[in-house]
Image: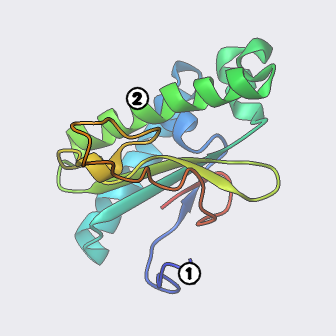
Amino acid sequence: MDKRGLTGQYSQFVIAGAAIAVIAPKFEAWRPAFWDNLAASVQLHHITKLIAIDHRDCGAAQIAYGASSIADPAIDTETHRKALAEFRKAVGKRQPKLTIETGLMALDGSIQMFSRNAGRLPRRSDRVGPPRRTDARHHPAPPSPSRSIAPAGSVR
């Protein structure tokens, strides 16, 4: 958070499973705590951005979706990518003014960001992956695929 200039400038909510805890049917009973906390943070602290970080080899993902959901790194990534997309959609419905960032933390602490600024219409610079070529003169650089920004299992 130091690198982003956010030290002491955020509210933190930590729950096992992070975003998976908010959207997986297995953890439905936990949802009110997250949504109530988020609403209070928006109201009291006037937050404008939510950063959700899941982590690899997540036991909550295994509980929610089965051992096969984290069987290898590619499957693990896809499980979290889908869960975080569903999480962004759910947050966007309840708190449409929030900017939402999501990512997946590796066990070494590096983070692969899946989205930034999901609360607004995406810009070309927000895409992950190779740039699309619109013509021979326009080649925008893709965003960095990983950044260390938050501890695993945090929803901020």
Frontmost residue, 104 versus 153: 104
Q: Which residue is mark 1?
A: 3
Residue at position x 61%, y 24% from top? 79
Identity, as a three-letter code, of the amino acid under mark 2: Glu
Q: Where on the picture, by quarter, is residue 110?
A: bottom right
Residue where numbered disc 2 is placed: 86
- SS class, disc 2: helix
Q: Residue at x 45, y 54 (%)?
A: 143
User: Any mark on residue 103, and which?
Assistant: none
Please state the horizontal and vertical placement of residue 117, each as a whole percent of the image: 30, 54
Q: Nearer the viewer, mark 1 or mark 2?
A: 1
Q: Amino acid at mark 1?
A: Lys
Q: Is residue 154 above or below residue 131?
A: below
Q: Position of residue 43 (x, y in %)?
A: 23, 68
Q: Nearer the viewer, residue 122 or 37?
A: 122
Q: How is the image coloured?
A: rainbow
Q: Is residue 54 above or below residue 9?
A: above
* The one of 152 and 11 positioned closer to us in this rendering: 152
Image coords of residue 69 (percent x, y)? 70, 18
Identified at 58% across, 66% down, the residue is 149
The N terminus, quarter of image = bottom right
For the point 45% across and 38% down, the residue is 130
Cα–Cα gap, marks 1 and 2: 28 Å
Provide the secondary structure element on which disc 1 rests. loop
Q: Residues within 10 Å of mark 2 (few under 14, many from 20)?
A: some
Residue 5 percent across, percent down from the top left: 47, 85
* Label 1 CA crowd tier, 10 Å (few <14, some 14–19, many 20+): few
Q: Earlier in the sequence, mark 1 or mark 2?
A: 1
In the depicted structure, whether residue 56 falls above or below residue 111: above
Q: Is residue 1 left or right of residue 152?
A: left
User: Is the Cβ of the residue at disc 1 closer than 8 Å to that at disc 2?
Assistant: no
